[in-house]
Image (tube, rainbow, N blue to C red):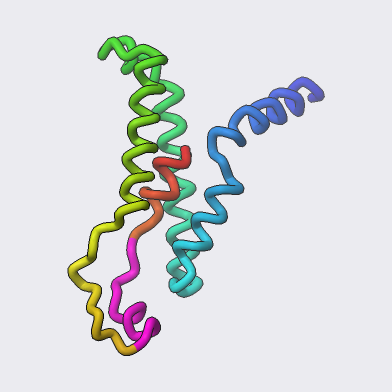
Amino acid sequence: MLDLIKAVGLGLVVLLPLANPLTTVALFLGLAGNMNSAERNQQSMMASVYVFAIMMVAYYAGQLVMNTFGISIPGLRIAGGLIVAFIGFRMLFPAHKAHESPEAKSKSEELESEPSANIAFVPLAMPST
């Protein structure tokens, strides 16, 4: 029984940095600020399902996919760095959205007219995991 507790504890310690829950919670709270409680619950449940699925696929098929396509660990690091740089540049120079109008009377009217986005997969589950 003690060995089982040690194995589960070690598994959680290894998975926590991969899932990055503290940063994901802060991101979720920032993005779901204008959602009602039911939408937030649905988005958090779907993000949890997506994270589980991504981790299982990566665990079981990751090495096979990397060997099949000839991807090395340094190549994977370079690709990850390029993705982070691309996201950073998009944050520095945001594109003007077509539905944003300078004639908006107030921020509350603009938020009400905007449809709620699905944030469960991107950015909560995929880049964070």
Residue for point 34% across, 85% down: 109
Residue for point 32% across, 80% down: 110
Q: Is residue 122 above or below residue 107?
A: above
Q: Position of residue 60 (x, y in %)?
A: 42, 21
Magenta stretch, residue numbers: 106-117
Is 73 one of the magenta-colored residues?
Answer: no
Examine the image and state in which quarter residue 101 appears.
Answer: bottom left
Q: Position of residue 129 (x, y in %)?
A: 47, 37
Examine the image and state in which quarter residue 80 appears.
Answer: top left
Residue for point 42% across, 37% down: 53
Task: Spot the residue most to the right.
Answer: 2
Task: Spot the residue most to the front.
Answer: 92
Examine the image and state in which quarter residue 17 appears.
Answer: top right
Q: Position of residue 92 (x, y in %)?
A: 36, 52
Q: Is residue 34 above or below residue 78?
A: below
Q: Is residue 93 above or below residue 115?
A: above
Is 111 one of the magenta-colored residues?
Answer: yes
